[in-house]
Amino acid sequence: MHDLIDPAFRADGAVFHSRLTESVGSAAGLPFPLFLQQEGLLQRMAREAALAATVSGVAFSDDEHPAVIGRLWEGLEVDPPLNLHGDWLSLVPAPQQAVLLQRWQELRLQKYMDLTYSHRIDAYFLERRAELERVVYGMIRVRNQGAAEELYLRLIDDSADFTQLACAYSLGDERYTHGLVGPMPIGQPHPSIRQALIPLAVGDIAPPLRIDDWVLILRMEHREPACLNEATRQQLTTELFEADLAAFLAEQDLIAALDTHASAQVPDPGNSAGIGQTVDISHTEVGEPAALPAGQSG
């Protein structure tokens, strides 16, 4: 029996090399920026460039240095500097530089987001509060409408135990968790599930709900209203920034931007006024990145 099964991977060598050569040749014939765009690399590079430009003007005051240094050097067995003046990163051993640089970028971005979006968080929270409520709900998932109706009647009329029915009859993974799903934001489940859960009080059971090939019975187990704590504030701040960043990148013609920048790098003897030269934004003041993402929603 086992002689009939050959688990080894097989491929026609000639066809493989022919197709590989063809694919590489097609890619080689494209302009390099266009190749990067088609592979999704240009978009990733553009995001990284936008993030770098966003934090380019972010600095920390001397009073902030001790806390920032503590965050940067957390868990590192390297003596930290007394302050962050000058090229402090070059004084750190090479193995730790990559970690410190990543943390440095994250801390600068966090300060930028806090300064830029703090005045919008309260209003944005009111918009998102209903979707941020956290819930735990019970679910029984079956294929047959009739079976779902029977289980629903047993729960409503006979006060059957939801947990026992879920373990015995549910066909989804929730049968391993006694039918419980969550906790999670109420906006996270399938839209039809979310709409069924919204009006339920704790202990209420929704009538059978068909979604594609499944029929669901849902019961509300726990509701936790959203509150504007530090974790929620951070989540909303990040949401606002990511929305602005995505809008900024969507407006960019990345291929044209590369062509324009490349042309600007070519010295023009007649351009004594500096027209067409690149602009240094490394000293942009915090909160005033006019051409960068957050400036769009102000």
Image (cartoon, grey):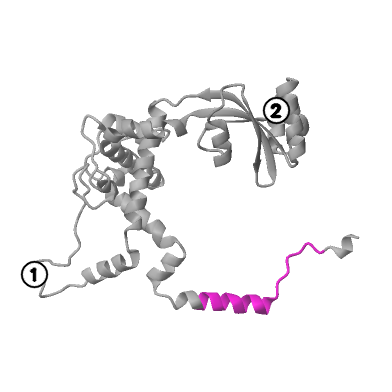
Which residue is depicted at the point 48% across and 74% down?
Answer: 27
Residue 205 visible in the shown view: yes
The image shows residue 235, relative to residue 159, as above or below, that is below
Q: Quadrant of the C terminus?
A: top left
- 73 or 46: which is nearer to us? 46
Predominant secondary structure, magenta span: helix
Query: Toward the viewer: 248 or 277?
Result: 248
Vertical placement of residue 158 versus 63, above or below: above
Instruction: Name the spot of residue 66 as percent of width and height, x first.
Output: 28, 30
Q: Secondary structure at mark 2?
A: loop
- Quadrant of the rendering where the N terminus is positioned: bottom right
- The x and y percentages for residue 201 are 56, 23
The residue at 32%/42% (across/down) is 109
Q: Disc 2 designates what residue?
A: 178
Residue range highlighted in magenta: 6-25
Q: Is residue 14 magenta?
A: yes
Residue 78 appears in the picture as rendered: no
Label annotation for residue 272: 1
Which residue does the image show at 34% across and 35% down from the upper left?
124
Q: Is residue 200 magenta?
A: no
Disc number placed over residue 242 in the picture, else none: none
Expressed as whole percent of the image width and height from the top left, the position of residue 251 reads 32, 58
- Determine contact: label 1, label 2, CB under 8 Å: no
In the image, taking residue 285 as reference, residue 297 lies left or right, namely right
Please, what is the three-letter code of the amino acid marked with disc 2? Answer: His
Residue at the far right in the pictured view: 1
Where residue 194 sits: x, y (%)? 55, 36
Residue at position x 74%, y 42% in the image: 143
The alpha-carbon separation of the residues under discs 1 and 2 comes to: 76 Å
